[in-house]
Amino acid sequence: MNLDISKEKRIYFIGIGGSSMSSLAEIMFRRGYSVSGSDMQESHYTEHLSSLGIPCYIGQKKENIVNAAPDIIIKTDAISDTNPEIKAAEENNIPVFRRAWLLGKILDGYKKTIGIAGTHGKTTTSSMITSILMEGVERPSAIIGGQMKRINSGFLLGDDDVCAFESCEYKESYLNFHPDISVITNIAEDHMEYFKTLDNLLESFRKYLDNTKSGGTVVINAENENTRKMLSLRPYKGQIVTFGFGHGDFHTENLSCDCGLYDFDVIDENRKERTHIKLSVPGKHNVINAVAAFAAARVYGISPDKIAAGLEKFNGVGRRFEYYCKVNGAVIADDYAHHPDAYKVTLDTARSLGFKRVIAIHQPHTFSRTKMLMNEFVEVLSQFDHVIVTPIYAARETNDAYGVYAEDVVARLDNAEYCPDYDTVAHRVKQMARPGDLFITLSCGDIYRCAERITELYGEEKFF
């Protein structure tokens, strides 16, 4: 359906409490639309939207749709066709669209867009680019999949000149977008319940490259094997810029680390430029994110000194190695990692920061990912000093097709135990914690609530 969004004044969001959905809801609210929505539980996001006067129903029921009487409905991809609010929309002939459709409509209103796709690092790289744009252009816009600390928000509303945005591959959402600059940070096997095979995943990313506008540029990781495979499927006719640690049009030299924080030179091979970069966020993975952001910003036309300033001022994204409190002298932190590759990055970062023991509080995210990547999760979790495993976070799924349980993960590990709820986890943390430890909650589910609960019950020194 080709709908003119400007004529639809009442918009209802099913799943309004998600990080991306809440940002879209607020953007449309600030543009003058009547906005309401629902989610299955309260969150910081629903509380914030409610404080603006946006009705947020907790629980999803047919009567919510009757009461809100929307012109259109936007749903997150986690919402199934059997959802009672979807059924109510069908009964009342209210058109329903995916989140990505609305984001695409919003992006169409900008003169230039920079889309950041890839399995890992999308939110951080998007936020880094946003921080750079804040230094280099007047009133930039951004739509990010998390809370960027520098702006304390998941979006930035500026003029209609340029917008940086996070471009998600789940269910091929990114095929709704047509960036002028398309960044692909990396490609790894994820969302395989949808893509089924690596070949399908690579073909999908290759299609996304063709969505880049004529005259645009793709910025890709020269050192990621799957990205190279994707590009080899068929020639890309537009401009390609590459980045990496040691290879690519943009790469690093003179890399050094002090207490987990990196500084380095970025070499621009084509312009024969060298720019020194100092990061304010820990982890070697953030070096490659920064080089990707540097390359995209340079393609857009930002000067190297402005890029360096934007990267140094970037102070992170919520739920990315975020400290909460201390318990018995141990640090309690939370991270959004939900893939074995990301767990390894988080562990490496923790080791670089000098913690004596690193204890993972692992919330398996979705039955499909837990089943399909069981061996990979077991391999990386075995490298932690200890692992506390909570029940699987189902998200959009049921366990009927998978038959997998959190206890299955524990059974494969010699260093793990199972805790059925967050109070039990908090009690175990209190028992085990000692100075020099790091306890880090890991998942893109609601495991951050566990970190909050530990802080509430036993937190001695709080970091917020």
Image (cartoon, helix red, strand yellow):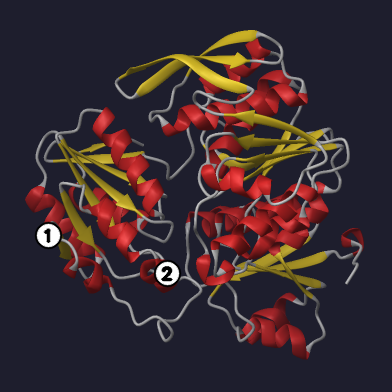
Rounded to the nearest whole Å, what is the CA distance between mark 1 and mark 2?
23 Å
Mark 1 secondary-structure assignment: loop
> Which quadrant of the rendered structure holds the N terminus?
bottom right
Figure quadrant of residue 138? top right
Count up the numbered dots. 2
User: Looking at the picture, how far across and down is residue 242, in whole percent?
Assistant: 64, 30
The residue that appears at 68% across and 82% down in the rendered structure is: 86
Residue 247 showing in the rendered view:
yes
1 or 2: tag closer to the N-terminus: 2
Q: Is residue 82 left or right of residue 302?
A: left
The percent coordinates of residue 44 (x first, y second) are 48, 54
The amino acid at mark 2 is Thr
Residue 32, visible in the rendered structure: no
Which residue corresponds to the image point at 40% horizontal and 20% vertical from the top-left?
Answer: 262
- The residue identified by callout 2 is 366
**Discs 1, 2 touching: Cβ within 8 Å:** no
Depth check: give the residue in front, 46 or 234.
234
Density class for disc 2 (Cα within 10 Å; few <14, some 14-19, many ≥20) is: many
Determine the image quadrant of residue 319: top left
Q: Determine whether the residue tagged by mark 2 lies in a helix, strand or loop.
A: loop
Q: Nearer the viewer, residue 338 or 118?
A: 118
Which mark's residue is nearer the viewer, 1 or 2? Answer: 1
Q: Which image quadrant: the C terminus?
A: top left
Q: Which residue is located at x 72 percent, y 75 percent?
A: 68
Q: Residue drawn at (70%, 87%), measured in percent from left and top?
A: 88
Where residue 452 sits in the image (x, y, percent)? 31, 52
- Could you tell me residue 331's position as x and y percent? 22, 38
Which residue is under mark 1? Answer: 414
In the image: residue 205, left or right of residue 363:
right
